[in-house]
Image (tube, helix red, strand yellow):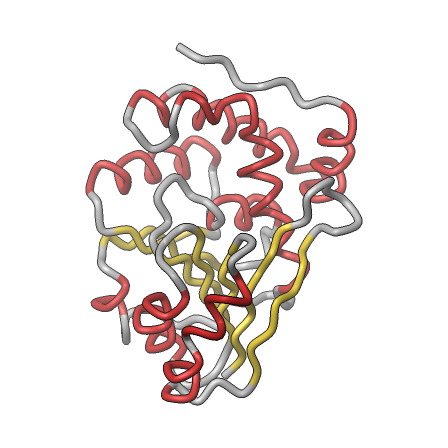
Amino acid sequence: MAEAPELTGAELDAAQKVFGDRLPLAQRYVEHLATSGIERGLIGPREVPRLWARHVLNCAVVQEHIAQDASVADVGSGAGLPGLCLAIARPDLQLTLIEPLERRVIWLTEVVEDLGLDNVTILRSRAEQAVGEVDADYVTARAVSALVGLLDITMPILRGTGQLLALKGRSAAEEITKAQKKLNKYGARDTEIILAGDDLLEEPTTVVRVTL
């Protein structure tokens, strides 16, 4: 069984700033990822050394673009990235983790119960079927699909108002170009590439923000 990677140096500084007094909860979450998360196929074993930098901190810094006391729907939540990271960093937020696969839902439920996160609801559903069931100011997604396809499963959840925060990589600008017709179809008022954690992380997180 893999052990959770030690948190040191710049990563420790960033984690302390992002999670504050809830850092022990974040560390416990990483322990879950490194053990049962790998055993059940939610995370690949090669990811263990970079769980903090590439996954947990990469996701948690997105919280700086989310307003106080907001409701957030995390689509295709998987191993809780970014949903659980946001729930730990921001107890004021109300998170709904939308995940269709039963084995992932079971794992997420176990982790949420172990961490005592009372600001998280887990919904076993495809995103398309969650429309009308979830009230969200923001929708988040990471590694779900290219933007052109992601819009179809996230925009309806917002019901005409709010923001999509899609965690993306270097192809963000290209994805926006390819999705232009869909963005117009859904009435996007603004679509931009923003960074999260650029003052905390060696590699800040690239986010495509779509505002309705």
Q: Quadrant of the N terminus?
A: top left
Residue nearest the viewer, comparing 87 with 56: 56
Q: Nearer the viewer, residue 66 or 51?
A: 51
Residue 132 location (% of width, % of height): 28, 76
Report the residue that reaches farthest toward the top.
1
Disc count in the image?
Answer: 0
In which quarter of the view is residue 95 placed? Answer: bottom left
Residue 207 lies in quadrant: bottom right
**Where is residue 210 shown, x and y percent of the image?**
52, 75
In the displayed structure, does residue 148 sit left or right of residue 70? Answer: left
Q: Is residue 5 above or below residue 129?
A: above
Image quarter of residue 57: top right
Image: 107 above or below 184: above
Residue 36, position in %: x, y? 35, 22
Residue drawn at (33%, 51%) of the image:
122
Q: Tell me what residue is drawn at x 73 percent, y 40 percent.
A: 202
Instruction: Give left or right: position of 196 versus 98.
Output: right
Residue located at (37% from left, 72% from top): 151
Q: Residue at x 64, y 37 (%)?
A: 22
Is 105 left, or right, of 160 in this rendering? Answer: left
Vertical side of 27 occupied by 4: above or below: above
Percent across and percent down for residue 188 are: 48, 85
On screen, residue 19 above or below 44: below
Q: Nearer the viewer, residue 43 or 162?
A: 43
